[in-house]
Image (cartoon, grey):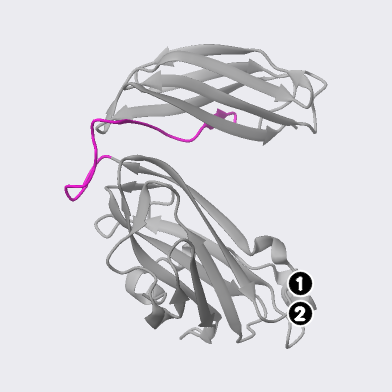
Amino acid sequence: MRRSWGTFAIATVVLAAATAAAAAGSPTSDDVSLGIQVFNTTDLLHPTTTPGTKFKLAFAVDTAAGVSQVVVVRVGLPDGLRWGTDGPDPGEGCTGTAPAVCRQTLLTNGAGTVEGGYIWDVIADHLGTYDVTATVEPEQPDPNPANNTATLHFEVVGGSTGGHGDTSRATASAVKLSPAKPRAGSTVVASVRVTKGGSAVRPTRVRCAASTGAVKVKGTARAASGVASCLFKTPRGGAGKRLRGSVTFSAGGASFTRRFAAKLS
């Protein structure tokens, strides 16, 4: 369906357009940005999780200067996700589904903002984490094309599955770093939440890997109920460099690898 924030009341999820680009834009130039949000009709506004295998994805196109123009939105779903009853269709200016390519004219809403987008039904074949990427291409020049692509990383967890969820599989969250903004020379903990059927499960064979540039960073593996974690002692001379790593483990008969990256201050 066409985007309707009045119905779903989730206007705050869109990406904010840059005010500097708006000031520099001309009547035929506009900073067009794209935002993606996942939400469940029984439990709205979960930015990174949805409790059940039937949910909706919202693709919001926003402008800075408010130029009404035609845009092309491209969306592809990864393995394990498929469109539901209300998915991309020709009546919305869409062709294909893998990816869906949709043309839409951005219009002024009740608040006087020029915007557009879509809200579609999605079904997950099993619980787990997914990445959905979408792009928008405006017909007019865009002074900031860097925000024309968006990727949403989210998790489908146990809950109201509507009879389609596979609760026998273990699922793993994205990596959480502590501290979230690590400093060079400090110890960084990278942890992954592990569940099965909505309950915590203890991971096994936890392995850690990380580096800053060409320098490897030693990691200490830990396993607890519902958590796989790695402790990394970052080098003191690593300020300004990116710490890249992974947490690998087994749970519920499956193997998982979750990667992360953070700039050391």
Q: Which mark is residue 63?
A: none
- Looking at the image, residue 111 lies above or below residue 238: below
Judging by the rendered image, the residue that carries numbered circle 1 is 143
Q: Nearer the viewer, residue 200 or 121?
A: 121
Residues under numbered marks 1 and 2 in contact, where contact means CB atoms less than 8 Å apart: yes
Disc 2 residue type (three-letter): Gly
Judging by the rendered image, the residue that carries numbered circle 2 is 25
Residue at image position (38%, 75%) is 89
Q: Is 151 on the left or on the right of 213, as rendered? A: left
- Looking at the image, residue 208 lies above or below residue 46: above
On the image, which quarter does residue 88 sit in? bottom left
Name the dominant secondary structure of the magenta segment: loop
Task: Residue 231 in the image: state x and y as whole percent.
Answer: 58, 16
- Mark 1 or mark 2: which is in front? 1
Task: Residue 117 in the image: state x and y as whole percent.
Answer: 48, 73
Q: Quadrant of the C terminus?
A: top right
Disc 1 residue type (three-letter): Pro
Residue 75 sits inside the magenta stretch: no
Magenta-tinted stretch: 158-180
- Looking at the image, residue 16 lies above or below residue 178: below
Residue at image position (37%, 76%) is 6
Q: Secondary structure at mark 2?
A: loop
Residue 161 sits inside the magenta stretch: yes
Q: Nearer the viewer, residue 71 or 5?
A: 71
Question: Dot 2, how many residues are within 10 Å of its Cα: few (below 14), some (14-19), or many (20+)?
Answer: some
Q: Secondary structure at mark 1?
A: loop
Task: Residue 199 in the image: state x and y as whole percent.
Answer: 26, 28
